[in-house]
Amino acid sequence: MSGLVFDSARALAARVRKRELSSEEVVRAFIAQVERVNPKVNAIVTFLPERAIAEAREIDRRLARGEDVGPLAGLPIAYKDMIVTRGIRTTFGSPIHADHVPDTDHAIVERLRAAGVVTLGKTNTPEFAAGSQTFNPVFGATRNPYDLTRTCGGSSGGAAVAVACGMLPFADGSDLGGSLRNPGNFNNVVGLRTTPGRVPYWPATDVWATLSVLGPIARTVEDAAFLLSAMAGPDPRSPISITEPGERFARPLERDMKGVRIAWWSSAGGCLAGADAIPVDARVSRVLERQRSVWESLGCVVEEAHPDLRGADEVFHVLRALSFVQRYQDLLAKHRERMKDTVVWNIEQGLALDAPRIARAMALRTDIYGRMRQFMERYDFLALPVNQVPPFPLTQPYPDAINGVALASYIDWMKSAYYITVTSHPAISVPAGFTDDPVPLPVGLQVVGRYRDDFGVLQAARAFEGATRVGERRPPIA
């Protein structure tokens, strides 16, 4: 049964519903893969095989009785360790919460359980999901399966590695500044940053917040859409939730791309064109520039163009710092010595803000959204790097320079991702190639769509994926 773990999630679920496979057989195959591979990468940090087998057996009993078990029945998932799960240890990657066991479930846990998903455990994340290098003092670091000396990215790093290695068919993740896209990019899998409100975010400190969103990670675009079909949809506890039902994402993604207009934000000169403050590692640029012709081969009209995102850096840093104050200022007062230095820095940045600076950031974001919306009236999609470097050494907390250009903060190597965050437009990381390093490293392409056109983004990514087939290259340890 070991071959099952790299099968399509949609196909596996269909076989379980038809009773060609039992849910228990599927879950046991994934458990065996976790036991074989996880010690090498440390992606799944809370592992619950007995619970998963019990849930799988119950699904099989319900199927035998002819009951509706849900469209994703029998498929296992391990939730990001930022997602509260009733009765299951949830640490947020922090020693402050090392023994925390919630008494409530997150909205997506409720939804996926109703869809028949089996809970297998929790995936690793940086402390409080801060930064895109997945390590914390509770569980340690998660390694990149294509080069175990490199980072897997983050903050949904454990999720992306588990999916890349066939330990899970798909996974959930969250994305503030790139935390679905960056690990997708670093691990040769798909990570979709959804439009704010597409997937309900509850419980939350600020239910009106739109910077951080939830979305799927999968080995293929089709499987990402399949998981999103169960995650998405309205929830009265999330006042910004979009009323459109999630089931629409289960529709076929095939699309004729002839005549589709692609804005190509070139990085061939060592930085994003027209954005001198965004240097891009030459290895990333070489991979992506080779893939521009893929869009042309699909019949797309490709033009070098980029939106005017002036002010995005200020907006992101201000509003991100404000969110850290909302969530963690009380912990800082009580447990400063137990918190990561970059988390402390972010909270203190927020505490130093005054009303005029916050008001300016909010007004700037409004302007940026308007400019992005107008730009996307001319183009169906925008293509650009996910982030500006390939996977860096595991021992390096974060890159401090690119192409000899010093970076101002621990997240500046992610500007190409978090500038898009500020616009609220949906974006996906899709496998695009490998660097020419002695140990080749994955590089993803970021595809951005029009506001709320998450389905269109999936369609475009599916077309690119089918033309390149880069995502079929598995990690050597898997």
Image (cartoon, rainbow, N blue to C red):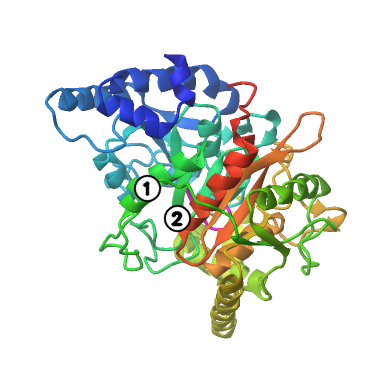
User: Is the residue marked by circle 2 packed among few (<14), some (14-19), or many (20+) residues within 10 Å?
Assistant: some
Q: What kind of element bears circle 1?
A: loop
Label 2 vs 1, first from the N-terminus:
1
* Quarter of the image with the C terminus in it: top right
Residue 415 drawn above or below residue 319: above
Determine which of the numbered discs, if any, sits on residue 98 in the image: none
Three-letter code for the amino acid on which mark 2 is drawn:
Phe
Residue 94 appears in the figure: yes
The magenta-colored residue range is 172-178
**Gap between marks 2 and 1 measured at Cα:** 9 Å
Residue sitting at the far right: 404
Residue at (41% x, 18% y) in the render: 29
Determine which of the numbered discs, if any, sits on residue 455 in the image: 2
Magenta region includes residue 175: yes
Pick whichever, 329 or 216, lies toward us.
216
- Relative placement, left or right, of 82 versus 320 is left
Place residue 79 in its image quadrant. Answer: top left
Q: Mark 1 points at which residue?
A: 251
Q: What kind of element bears circle 2?
A: helix
Place residue 117 in its image quadrant. Answer: top left
Residue at (31% x, 50% y) in the render: 247
